Amino acid sequence: MVERRVAVTGMGLVSPLGSTLDALYANLLAGVSGIRRMRADFSGRLECKIAAQVDFDPLQYFSKSKAGSLDRVSQFALAAARQAIDDAGLNLDAVDKSRIGIYLGTAMGGQTTNEEACERVYGPQGGRLRPLSVVMAMMNAAAAQIGLEFDLRAANLTFSTACASSAVAIGEAFHLIRRGGTDVMLAGGSEALLTLATIKAWEALRALATEDAGDPAASCKPFAADRSGLVLGEGAALLVLEDMEHAVARGARIYAELAGYGSNNDCRHITQPSAEGQAAAMRAALSSAGLAPGDIGYINAHGTATPLNDAAETAAIRQVFGAAADYVPVSSSKSMHGHLMGATAAIELIISILALTRGVLPPTINLHHPDPACDLDYVPNIARSGVALRYVMSNSFAFGGTSGVLIAGKV
């Protein structure tokens, strides 16, 4: 069987750095941080009061009644999906919708609805729940809402593999198109987990960053000696993936070719990554794309700013790239948009594709005190222009052990 090529023809997002492609990338290149003190009634009950929140008014996207029937995670997903479809110039009335599907990643689904239900049930007064609580909170709610909104009739699946969720969703959609299972897929992720109980759970895990005393926006410090943990974020990112011949036939603008995908299970520990496991996923992606390490011109790192991940990922890149690791630019955009969990891989693939098409690399901000154990070119603090790229790699390594590595290339 001849494997089909897969084009990226549309991209859409809702993010802490803006909800258009141009706004996102302008803020990234300017080193703007979307991390700040939380605006929430419960913030006084938190030890960690910083997060990367989205400025999002659902009434700009939905009627009041429609918005009230959707968890925030589904609101984000629908807004990003609409933007991606419009960006792709995809006329849904002129295509076979039985050949268009949705693969969506989310780590925690409808957390706002879940938490509201728990508050009502276990609160001092008790209380009735919303009639739609189940269908608002279920893990596949966001993907289901996209399918209903756009009448898409091919496969509709939700992937939940922690912070690799949208990497796996995109990668499996890539495989489905590649082998001829469908022609077009909406793939990506959505996450809305900035709720009291979720943040308290992360506090208990001791994985969250300590707020920077001088500037809360500078609290996420990937690869730095003074890094202290990750910063939670929220948002959604969706891509339109399309059989290359289908895209060319309809005259679509093609951003890039999705060229490779690797996923494996890092069996070392439920939360602690291994360099060997991460390296295996990168090698699998390179093999899938038919590329050598030297073909990769930029890596968007998982780069969570946790002590364990950043050192392990650095070592993994060295294992895969050898001597060439000294010359491959690597950056962590999480330093600016935070960790969007199930949506992270999708937004980072979009960022990688924008770097590929625009020739400017986003920096790793807040990298003022390098860690000797993290000794790669992390594009510190200032964006880098004039970079000629042919292929880019985006890494995602999750709690639980699931890895997802994606490679995109110029067409």
Image (spheres, grey):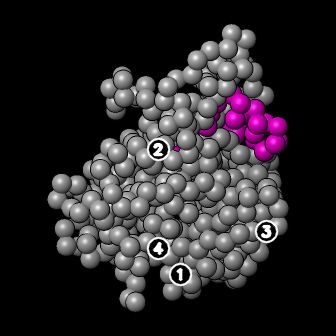
Q: Mark 1 or mark 2, which is nearer to you?
A: 2
Of the residues shown, which amino acid type is indicated by label 2? Ala
The residue pinned by badge 3 equals 267
Secondary structure type for disc 2: helix
Left or right: 207, with 294 as reference point: right
**How far is disc 1 from disc 2 in space, using C-alphas?**
29 Å
Tell me if residue 193 can be seen: yes
Q: Amino acid at mark 3?
A: Cys
In the image, which residues are magenta?
Answer: 190-219
Task: Give the image location of residue 308, x and y in percent.
Answer: 81, 58
Upstream in the sequence, badge 2 or badge 3? 2
Disc 3 + disc 1, Cβ < 8 Å: no
Query: x and y percent of residue 336 in the render?
Result: 58, 45
Callout 4 crowding tier (Cα within 10 Å): few <14, some 14–19, many ≥20: some
Rendered residue at 59%/74% (across/down): 262
Residue hosting label 2: 142
Q: Which residue is disc 4 drawn over?
A: 175
Helix, strand, or loop for circle 1?
helix
Q: Amino acid at mark 4?
A: His
Sequence order check, earlier mark of 1 and 2: 2
Residue 50 sits in quarter: top right
**Which residue corresponds to mark 1?**
288
Q: Quadrant of the C terminus?
A: bottom left
